[in-house]
Image (tube, helix red, strand yellow):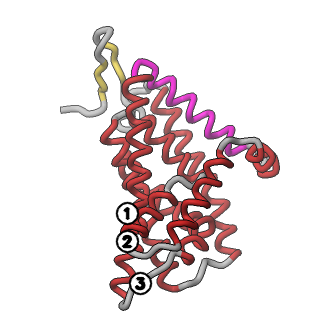
Amino acid sequence: MDLLAALTLGLLGSMHCIGMCGPLVLAVPSNAVSRWTFIGERVLYNAGKAVTYGVLGAVLGFAGKSVIMDLQQNISIVLGVTLLITIAIPLGLKSKIEKFSPLKYLYGFVKETFSALMKKRGRTALFLMGMVNGLLPCGLVYTALIGATVVADIRQSALFMIIFGIGTAPALVAVSLTGKLISVRFRSIITRIIPGISIVIAIILILRGMNLGIPLLSPKVVQTTTQEKTMDCCKE
């Protein structure tokens, strides 16, 4: 269910990615002599981005498992509420906050590194550009990372983010092939849909932390010892 959620988030959110990363994708250089070679280059580029997502997912999965395991349910509720609050913040206020956010330095690093890699040619440069693109500050990616944190398993959290990255790839490859971005009107519709997706994810996070005993959605976690927990999610 977690992986299906990651894929769905990636596929639906890919329209948002077109608006945010579309121009960047179109600027990626190519040495392709055929359409299939071109597609292969774009797949390699998106694979690099998925790898970065996977690494970030593994890090947060480690944190979720080893640091907050005993508080996992409480953390799930806190992250869900935080996500709802973030969605409720007016866009203008978000812009003001971002001016003082340390993420602006990350954006500067991504911009400089990406520009340097664009001057190079070859598959390695394409893969590295994709990896750098994966570091680009993005609200949709943050939403996915929150989900990966709650999964609280290094491998599963990494896989969660990789699947999310794969989900965003088809739309971006399509943009590269057509050379056109989606219309402003359609982009505005998608922009309105993304908060709705985030709200659904926030509600799921809150439900998962409430220990309601609902299979898959809010499984019952029973404390058996001071070191172990069992999850009553399925019946044999």
- For disc 2, the marked residue is 43
Between 217 and 167, the one nearer to me in the picture: 167
Residue 20 badge: none
Residue 19 in the figure: left or right of residue 235? right
Residue 157 in the figure: left or right of residue 97? left
Toward the bottom, the furthest residue is: 33
Please say if 229 is above or below 148. Answer: above
Q: Say which label, 3 or 2, has the lower sequence index.
A: 3
Distance between the Cα atoms at labels 3 and 2?
A: 14 Å
x and y, in percent, of residue 133 in the image: 52, 60
Mark in the foreground, 1 or 3:
3
Residue 47 badge: 1
Q: What amino acid type is highlighted by mark number 1?
A: Ala
Distance between the Cα atoms at labels 1 and 3?
A: 18 Å
- For disc 3, the marked residue is 31
Please say if 11 is above or below 123. Answer: above
For the magenta stretch, what is the residue range? 68-88
Tags 3 and 2 touching, CB below 8 Å: no
Q: What amino acid type is highlighted by mark number 2?
A: Val
Residue 10 in the figure: left or right of residue 19? left
Could you classify mark 1 by the number of other residues whose Cα lies within 10 Å: few (under 14), some (14-19), or many (20 or more)? many
